[in-house]
Image: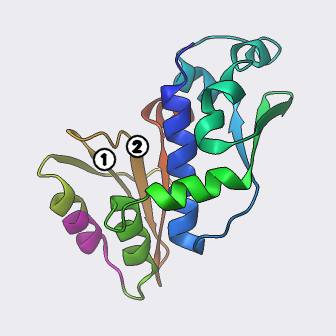
């Protein structure tokens, strides 16, 4: 089983968490719906079959994350990750990573969508920007030529801008 995309997703979520909240060496729990795991692992299995697919993941990731436990209730899977993973991510996150810059920008009072688009352009000359009016978000932005495959969705709340990022497949599943 190829766990590379799952490892990257877990790492990216921890980087985002540390960019928003700061670093603390602590155990964390990250949750995934079955559909996201199927996308990440390129599988099409049921909730009952997924534990077998994930059986070797704790051994695969142990040298980086330490102990990882996987559990589930129905189609909701929980990854309980040791404090070693928080430390690993902290020690391997570059201070100029895009997610850190984005979190810092969005946290600024008066941040505009134009500033966000400029930040994306500063990271890559080839981005996709869509104005979307689906009731949930106002803009969809993603990179077309980098390792960052996420879809970033932005909503102007009037006094500040919020964002969520999705795997392209998860974004499609939502039917926005």
**Residue 145, percent from left and from top:** 20, 39
- Residue at 30 percent of width and 70 percent of height: 113
Magenta highlight on residue 30: no
Disc 1 designates what residue?
142
Q: CA distance from mark 1 to mark 2?
A: 6 Å
- Can you see residue 137? no
> Which quadrant of the figure has residue 95?
bottom left
**Residue 79, percent from left and from top:** 74, 39
- Residue at 49 percent of width and 27 percent of height: 4
Q: State the quadrant of the N terminus.
A: top right
Say whether marks 1 and 2 touch (CB < 8 Å): yes
Q: Main secondary structure of the magenta part?
A: helix
Residue 107, compared with residue 66, is above or below; it is below
Q: Residue furthest bottom?
A: 109
Question: Neighbour class for label 1 at 10 Å: few (<14), some, many (≥20)?
Answer: many
**Residue 80, percent from left and from top:** 78, 44
- Residue at 29 percent of width and 68 percent of height: 116
The one of 109 and 131 positioned closer to us in this rendering: 109
Residue 28's label in the rendered image is none
The one of 14 and 145 positioned closer to us in this rendering: 14
Q: In this rendering, would 148 be left or right of 78? A: left
Q: Earlier in the sequence, mark 1 or mark 2?
A: 1
- Can you see residue 46? yes
Residue 62, compared with residue 92, is above or below; it is above
Q: Which residues are magenta?
A: 111-119
What element does badge 1 sit on?
strand
Q: Residue furthest left?
A: 125
> Which quadrant of the figure has residue 109?
bottom left
Disc 2 designates what residue?
150
């Amino acid at each position: 089983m190829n766990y590379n995309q799952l490892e990257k997703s877990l790492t990216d979520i921890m980087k985002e968490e540390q960019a928003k909240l700061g670093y603390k060496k602590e155990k964390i729990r990250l949750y995934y719906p079955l559909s996201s795991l199927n996308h990440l692992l390129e599988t099409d299995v049921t909730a009952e079959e997924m534990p077998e697919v994930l059986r070797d993941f704790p051994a695969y990731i142990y040298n980086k994350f330490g102990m990882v436990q996987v559990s589930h209730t129905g189609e909701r899977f929980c990854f309980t990750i040791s404090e070693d993973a928080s430390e690993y991510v902290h020690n391997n996150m570059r201070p100029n990573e895009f997610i850190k810059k984005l979190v810092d920008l969005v946290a600024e009072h008066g941040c505009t969508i134009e500033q966000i688009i400029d930040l994306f352009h500063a990271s890559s000359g080839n981005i996709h920007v869509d104005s979307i009016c689906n009731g949930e978000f106002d803009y969809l932005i993603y990179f077309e030529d980098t390792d960052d495959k996420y879809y970033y969705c932005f909503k102007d709340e009037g006094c500040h801008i919020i964002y969520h990022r999705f795997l392209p497949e998860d974004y499609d599943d939502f039917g926005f």
